[in-house]
Image: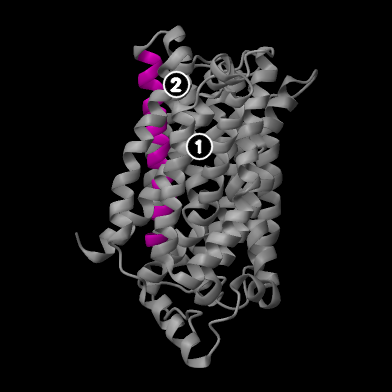
Amino acid sequence: MPGKTRAIVATSIGNMLEWYDFTVYALFAGYIAGNFFPADDANTRLLKTFLVFGLGFVVRPLGAVLIGNFGDRAGRKAALTLTILLMAAGTGIIAFAPTYASIGFGAPLLLLLGRVLQGFSAGGEVGGATAYLLESAEPQQRGRVASWLEASMGMANMLGALAAFSVTATLSTTQVQAWGWRIPFIFGLLIAPVGLYLRRSLDETEAFQAEALRRARDHTQEKVPLLEIFRNHRRGLFVGFCVAILWAVAVYVLMIFLPTYVQHPDTFNFSARQAFGASLIGNIPFVIGCLWFGSLSDRIGRRRSLFISAALLLLLVLPLFMWLKASPTLPTLIVVQCIVCILVASFVGVAPAALSEIFPTGVRSTGTSLVYNGAFTVFGGFAPMILTGLTQRSGGSIYSPAWYVMLAAGVALFAIPHLGGRGSTALVAPANYPIVTNEP
């Protein structure tokens, strides 16, 4: 396998495992709720299950700091190997955790432990993976190469939707409730050894090796990346965080939460098979879109790409929800899901390269991890719980998810023009213009 291809596959497979685990947790939330919170009514069980889902995000900033710092000191390869091991451990705990009927209150505690391990590893995954991809690519191809990170998320969603569709189509509701929900998590464990093997075989990036030599030469090895970030890159952190808000909200509301949301009798009342099938189909244009829009940003610039995408999300999401409400049929759901996935791809396919280019090599993993996980923790992880609660309230609007996305798009539109400072020249360079990087 050629070196560049190996780098893309090895880096993306861990991200795919992360998103696969999160996807199947969200898709099987109703079944998990019945096994770990049986004493409550159906709505309360679902809220508690999504609360555990969200609590896994609380530790993401800690993972971003510790693993990001580790990646900027010990290397991208070491950090990527650590994150996939932690992901596998968390997935294994959830897959084999005894139910509440077996061990009582210990069952939801084990569920929480699995999510915490997943969240901690995910906190350092994107920063390290993006840094590795960016530093492995030619400057003129950074958008295309980094877009594989989010394309792998689409592949994970396809696997998750396919697993959910297969399990619910072949097993009875009673069987899925009793043990069938564990099958997708067990399948996820099979991905981990492949990813671990590929990541251990990677070479360290030339950019990181050059940075390590510079630090050794200048006797600056003792510097802490986290302190350097807050001392010299506060503006980049703030702007990157505001842009990442839409990244987080678009993914978790429109791709992770929507297939569960449309099943609720108070919203659109689709069956599980219909929702999972539409999600599976929608992720096909998402994967293609991520790669296409990432490549497009290499030609027209990151800022322009992100701004147009955020504007389209702001304008089109609510009309799509209204159309689905007016025509709640399977063909409409499939079309809406496909359009939504393309809109999300147009933003998240560009975001990894755009945000990581803000920071220089010495703090790239830490900086990217902080802005990504800060946004995902505050605005993404608890989105399913918040929106479920809002919809279930008396008078709650079924359009709450659309309003939430529109608010995030407004914040991003304010921040995107300020994607400047050190490293910003790569954000606006046309195809035939020499890209200036931020490498020391």
Within 10 angstroms of label 2, few (less than 14), some, or many (20 or more) residues?
Answer: many
Do we see residue 302 in this rendering?
no
Q: Residue at x 48, y 13 (%)?
A: 177
- First to last magenta residue range: 144-169
Question: Residue lying furthest bottom in this view?
Answer: 218
The location of residue 180, given as percent across then percent down, is 41, 17
Question: Residue lying furthest right in this view?
Answer: 394
Is 19 left or right of 401, judged from the image as shown? left
The location of residue 227, given as percent across then percent down, is 66, 73
Q: Does the magenta run of residues contain 159?
A: yes
Q: Residue at x 66, y 37 (%)?
A: 383
Q: Name the chief secondary structure element in magenta.
A: helix
Q: Amino acid at mark 1?
A: Phe
The location of residue 172, given as percent across then percent down, is 41, 8
User: Could you tell me which secondary element the residue under label 1 belongs to?
Assistant: helix
Say above or below: 57 vs 234: above
What is the C-alpha distance between the residues marked 1 and 2?
13 Å
**Of pointers 1 and 2, the one earlier in the residue sequence:** 1
Q: Tell me the colour scheme of the image.
A: one colour
- Which residue is denoted by mark 1 in the rendering? 22
| Location of residue 34 by image quarter | top right
| Location of residue 314 by image quarter | top right
User: Could you tell me which secondary element the residue under label 2 belongs to?
Assistant: loop
Say above or below: 279 vs 126: above
Is 415 left or right of 177, judged from the image as shown? right
Locate the N terminus by quadrant: bottom left
- Which residue is denoted by mark 2 in the rendering? 181
Q: Which one is nearer the viewer's eye here, 117 or 391? A: 117
Q: Which one is nearer the viewer's eye here, 283 or 33? A: 33
